[in-house]
Image: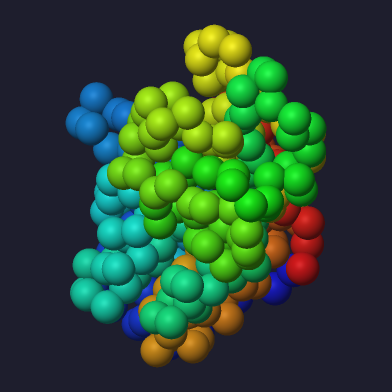
Amino acid sequence: MDISYTHDVVAQLAPNGVLRAGINLSNFLLVTGKTMAGDPVGVAPDMAKAIADHLGVGLQLVPFPSPGPLADAAVDDVWDIGLIGAEPQRATHIQFSDAYVEIEATYLVWADSAFQDAAELDAPGVRIAVSERTAYDLWLVRNIKQAHLVHAQGFDGAKAAFIDEKCEALACLRPALLKDVQTIAGTRIVSGRFTAIQQAIGTHRRHAAAAEFLQRFSQHAISSGLVASLIEKHAVQGLSVAPLA
């Protein structure tokens, strides 16, 4: 796959010779650790490095505590690419590539719940605890019609709301729920999923040449096996290579 680039691409992505990559620290599948210097380590930082290396420029990782502030910063001159979930609410100022990885999102419920499948939870009287402004929350905001979303700050906040308020369900990425079902007594995970979060590479909408290059690069990263190798390198469970567009 052709991943050549023009001078315009470099001028848009690294005008000062350094690619600034916005990294969401709260996604534990894409950021799995830190260096001794405190820099994030994982699939997302490595994808950013692969792009910088291909362009022959330096790399500066710009960490954010959660995806919402990273998306908000698209209007500021603080990052050149952002590695977060591609959601329509974020697309006003960000042009996303197609996904390079996917993460299933589903629900944790109480063991005695009548609900068995994720598709059943959008029902009257159901309260779903969820970490606000995550990609899966944005999907729920768009698609939930009858259930009530109980928004909380961060996943720990959503988990506390689920337990303290006895919500009917807790929404999150399946890999996180696989851990929590072992620590929150009397719970289980429903079958199925309500969505698969599409993790992509975004840049500013005004950078058309850069966006076109990032689309081709993301597809090359899939077809060449780069994405699969990064998942294997960081031993990430619950992260899948996205299908080619």
Left/right placement of residue 12 relative to residue 162 reads: left
Residue at 43%, 82% in the rendered image: 92
Q: Is residue 59 above or below residue 19?
A: above
Q: Position of residue 234 (x, y in %)?
A: 55, 29
Residue in the picture at 63% in, 63% down: 145
The answer to whether 229 is drawn above or below residue 210 in the figure is above
| Nearer to the camera, 237 or 231 | 237
Q: Is residue 105 left or right of residue 156?
A: right
Q: Position of residue 56 (x, y in %)?
A: 41, 63
Q: Quadrant of the N terminus?
A: bottom right
Q: Quadrant of residue 117?
A: top right
> How many numbered marks does the figure carry?
0
Which residue lies at the image location 61% right of the left edge and 18% below the top edge?
A: 187
Furthest toward the front, the residue is: 125
Q: Quadrant of residue 193?
A: top right
Image position, residue 212 (x, y; %):
57, 81
Compared with 29, 101 (above or below) is below
Q: Is residue 181 above or below residue 217?
A: above
Q: Residue at x 69, y 64 (%)?
A: 219
Quarter placement of the C terminus: bottom right
Task: Say left or right for 225 vs 11.
Answer: right
Foreground: 112 or 170? 112
Q: Is residue 24 visible?
A: no
